[in-house]
Amino acid sequence: MLCAPRCFRYAALCWAVATLDIDPGRVVVTGASAGGALAAAVTLMARDRGGPAISYQALVIPVIDDRCQTASMRQFVEAPLFGAREARLMWDRYLGTHGDRSNTSPYAAPGRAEDLVGLPPTFIQVGGLDPLRDEGIDYAVRLMASGVAVELYCAPGQHHGLAEYVRTMAQASSLYYASVAAAIA
């Protein structure tokens, strides 16, 4: 399994914190869709490898569980833009289609992480009609059960790719930006 996307992102984070004039107490990691998986993976790596310290993570419509077995995956098989079939295809392209994936690293699929203790406060935004909705909600619930402060926002009536829907984007964006701004204030 390739490490490149998440390892490069972690290396970039380490470089930026060590090299640039960044306040180490205000490091925020964020990403949308597959970028949400990368952000969650980098946050897990930073915790497990002893830094840099992440003060906040914001995961917008994150793709974080390769098992694709949630109720929303079964419910939104043919959702516009990105349905359950596309999610499975994406994971097959990323992890490969051959063999047993039960030992998939949580750095590749953060939804598989068993230990979420010690992760930073987290903002998670999901779409109400997104096949990824339940894996995002599950991750939020598991983070909360591990003592992590979580702000969860579910945009009702929205499919994957919230940016495509102008009607509720202003509200969703303002919640996201307010959450990140409060984390670094």
Image: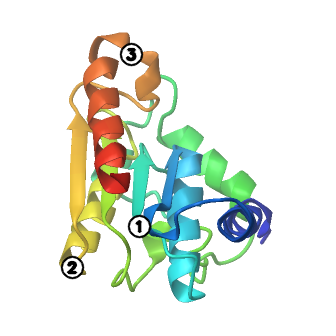
> Element type at marker 3?
loop
The answer to which of 127 and 43 lies nearer the viewer is 43
Residue type marked 2: Gly
Residue at left offset 58%, top offset 39%: 86
- Which residue does the numbered mark 2 point to in the structure image? 147
- Which residue does the numbered mark 1 point to in the structure image? 55
- Which residue does the numbered mark 3 point to in the structure image? 165
- Label 1 CA crowd tier, 10 Å (few <14, some 14–19, many 20+): some
> Of marks 2 and 1, which one's residue comes earlier in the chain?
1
Vertical comparison of 11 with 21: above or below: below
x and y percent of residue 17 in the render?
Answer: 65, 67
Residue type marked 3: Tyr
Residue type marked 1: Ser
Which image quadrant is residue 95 in?
A: bottom right
Foreground: disc 3 or disc 2: 2
Foreground: disc 3 or disc 1: 1
x and y percent of residue 149 in the render?
Answer: 22, 67
> Of marks 3 and 1, which one's residue comes earlier in the chain?
1
| Residue 127 visible in the snapshot | no
